[in-house]
Image: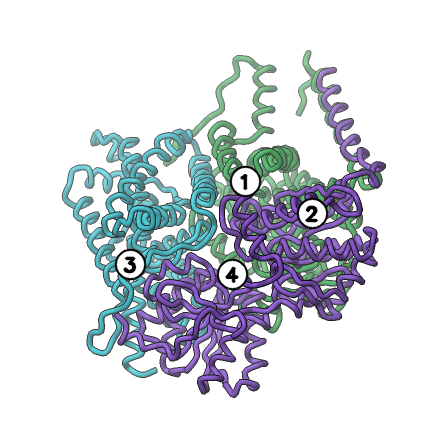
Chain colours: A green, B cyan, C purple
Amino acid sequence: MATRDARGDRVAVRIRIGWAALAVGIAVVAVLPFFASDYLVGFFFTTFLFVSMAYGWNLVSGFTAYVSFGQMSFFGIGAYTLAILVSRNAWPWPIAVLAGTATAAVLAVPLGWAMLRLRGPYFALGMLGLTQVLAMVASAWISVTRGGEGIYLPPEATLRQLYYAGAALVAVAVVVTWAVDRSAFGLRLRSIGEDELAAEAMGVDTTMAKLASFVLASTFPAMAGGLYAWRLSYIDPASAFPAGYEVQTILMAIFGGAGTVWGPLIGGFLFTAVGEVLWAKFAEVHLLLFGVMILIVLLFLPEGIIPLLRRRRMRRRAPVGPAPIREEAA
Amino acid sequence: MDARTFLQLLVNGTMVGGVYGLMSLGINLVWGVMGVVNLAHGDVIMAGGFLAFWLFTRFGVNPLVALPIGIAAGLCLGILVQRFLLGRVPPDRGAVKTSLLMTFGVSYVIINGAQLLWGNEFQTVMFLGGSWHVGGLDFAKTRVIAFAAAGFISVSLWAFLQYTFTGRAVRAVSQHPDGALVCGIDIPRIRVLTFGLGSALAAAAGVLLVMIFAISPSMGTGYTVRSFAVTVIGGLGSFPGALAGAVMLGLAEVFTGYLFSAQIANGIAFLLFLAVLLVRPQGLLGMKRV
Amino acid sequence: MPKRWTGIAALVMTAVQLAAAPAADAQQNPIVVGASVSLSGPYAGSGKYALEGTQLWVDDVNKRGGLLGRPVKLVYYDDKSDPNTGVQLYEKLITSDHAELIVGPYSSAVTSATSTVAEKHKMVMIGSEAADTKIYSRGYKYNFQGQTQAGQYMLGALNLAKANGYKTVAMLAEDTAFPKAVSSEVVKAVGRFGLTVVFNETYSKGSSDFSALLTKVKQLAPDVLIANSYLPDAQGIIRQCRELGVDAKLFAVAVGAAEPEFANLGSTAEYVFGATQWAATMPWKGNPEFVKRYKEKFGRDPDYHSASNYATGEVMEAAVKQVGSLDQAKLAAAISKMELDTVYGKFKVNEQGIQVGFNSAMLQWQKGKQILVWPENLAQGKAILPTPPWSKRG
């Protein structure tokens, strides 16, 4: 990666700074609940959920360019599985969260098989519709989900436990993404994102690769959904399939840089911080400003922050390098 | 189910289907020409409805008079969005993805802007209540009028695309962009026009919709999905297909609502859409595209 | 490089400061009343009314010299109509802002989640905007219902149906907590009124075409049609009844007919009955003054959300005065036994904390106006029954 030339030292310093920042970040996250207010801990917990979901979206949409608008489907599956197992069978919540994740992953296999036959806008809207259909199932399948009445859970959740569970979820998401990014599997996914036909011609089993990323990506929102349901101690179709959360998740990944390892993390935290300021300063119009922000980011930072930083660094290193190749869309 | 009930359901479904048809034309046109599904489509429908509602309650403007106003407003909105947002997306391989996300952003802005302007209450325009009784069946007046207006606008659009120079240019870009470019067609201009037209059609559908149903700022997404489903069912770029798909969806909703439950009827659009995609991806009447 | 380090250090410092700030000062003036209100998102409209009701109460209580000799200060945040944000905000209000009294949020959905926070922190919360009784039947000790319970809504319609000798009821309900609760209460109650339910179905939230359901209803020709709905579906159902010629002798809707926007239906709204929890004309204690001051302060008429929130304030005020401290356990004990006349009627809860004091009234649209027709002690006019068939109406 880093070439050992005159600039090698600087690169090494940079990497060391990166590790140091990460270590400080982990330390802060680890001790935060011991001196922070409940509000701040709760705020970080919510941010963790979004960041991990952004990682999920990144795995399926960042790498392969199959834009999914339906990650909330798995969020809802995770939330409902937890709610049903805890309220009916009195399962301990951590096991129920894992069971929800497993349920989502198992369901993601046939769903992914069907949905991934679609491409481009078909896939995007198919996933959007999938969330709507699952919300409909949740309200119509009354014997299991109690329909629109919702399910109440025992009020036993403690914020600190949830906080660490959320932090662990983010850590897992980062490690998985990092591993995928460096693996042959990640390369296959990227090749699908670049040009699916060419990848297929090169002998990549695109169907398997896409399905694997779809299933892997479903586990993060499912786990987040389970934690969310446990924290709320109440779940109904509207809160299990929240349309607004989808937007936020996608934006975080894009803001940071889709298809990168650190994008969702950095994008997620920056985005939440900006969102919080907007909300605090302009409560009544903050959602509108949020929408405007989406447009601004897409206009001026379509590839996100991480690629931007990387490009700047490259430019510094090689001032007369070739411009990034951009193909005309067919 | 007796024959009369059956016929009554048939009438109700067909009438609603007509409006669905108009809804889907805009999304169909934009998708065909630009390769982008406008995710803000349903929200423009909603905004058109609110415009008509506002004109009606504030100034007593008849919704049929509001129709051209809505069309003009939709046209302007579409032109602005294409000119200042979508048109600025660099045409690289991420373009489709970025455009898709951008329409998502526009949708978000419209929803929240509408909430600020009109609140989040559902609103409706009470214009011509009641129905005509013909042959023992009830034809709701508003539905008949909306159906007729939707039909008229659809035929006008078809004539425009078929017989005018600009309309033909739009079709040319949709069928073969490179060929169109070689023929000297100003593609960016055609794209601006197409997006404007798409929004105008959506706004028109909204004006008609508010005569029949109550609308609220947050209901746009449901109509985006319905419009999209109709386009997929009928086939991209096919006029008769769009109409057939729309009527089919209208009928499917009414009959599942009657025979099974209202909840299932609400999700039938997606189920039909998925079934068609998996069995016949080009749509019922669509042409196979490369 | 050094620049960047200072940046990171500054960030960490801010985080630490943010985290460690509060403590101390808790016992100093004034008393903080904390509320999470919906100022953006789907409930923004009604949420504003609810907030203004609380604001007016805070003004009034300060005019009366505050509570326990201390002034009262309202601290509120916008919960975006989102339950998760609501949960975070009550944690903030209780732990960072040191709220000593809290007011419930808007809607059953948000209250379902935030009631747990209040219970965990042992803070009294009166759910002035949550009609769903299930929230309170979970054995919670600090949560009380400050809104008329779902079972009340259709009593007026059932009474009127019995008085006129009607026999059959068809019922439609939105598939969410509150409308379904109203439906199941009606099913439980019809026997007492000599009625039978011949049709009872639900539809999804956000539905707009009811023609399929109403076609089924038409074949059953019921005497009474009850729609347990909100405003948009109430409008849609009544309007499509007219379009499809669905006749009943009595049309009643749970929520919707009491809202002024129902007038959008024009002549189609005539004869329709609607449940209402509160009206400016009701003779409850302090109600006329409340309406007058509200208009002065906010320049518009209050709606029932404003009134129920004001009533919640009155209940908290009375409880604090009775107990003489802000000890939450004692306040909860006082509220559970309290009978208090408020602007919203008589406040009284049962042993679970479910509201049994507030009653629902019935109004009917007559010549473009909402006329209270039930119960008799509140009635402004007589109910017009039976509703003439649509074919006989212009």
Q: Which mark is residue C281?
A: 4
Q: Are marks 1 and 2 on the same chain?
A: no
Q: Which residue position is annotated with label 2?
A: C61
* Chain letter, disc 3 residue: B
Q: Tell me the amino acid under the disc marked 3.
A: Phe
Q: Secondary structure at mark 3?
A: loop
Q: Note whether C53 is above or below C189 in the view shown.
A: above
Q: CA distance from mark 1 to mark 2?
A: 27 Å
Q: Tell me the amino acid under the disc marked 4.
A: Thr
Residue B129: give x, y in percent of width and height: 29, 64
Q: Which residue position is annotated with label 1?
A: A284
Q: Which residue position is annotated with label 3?
A: B127
Q: Are marks 2 and 3 on the same chain?
A: no
Task: Please name which of the two marks, 2 or 3, marks the residue nearer to the observer.
Answer: 2
Which quadrant of the rendered structure holds the N terminus of chain C? top right
Q: Quadrant of residue A222?
A: bottom right
Q: Can residue B50 be seen in this snapshot?
A: yes
Q: Residues within 10 Å of mark 3 (few under 14, many from 20)?
A: some
CB of mark 2 within 8 Å of CB of mark 4?
no
Residue found at x 31% / y 62%: B16
Q: Secondary structure at mark 2?
A: helix
Q: Tell me the amino acid under the disc marked 1.
A: Glu
Q: Are marks 2 and 4 on the same chain?
A: yes
Q: Tell me the amino acid under the disc marked 2.
A: Val
* Chain letter, disc 2 residue: C
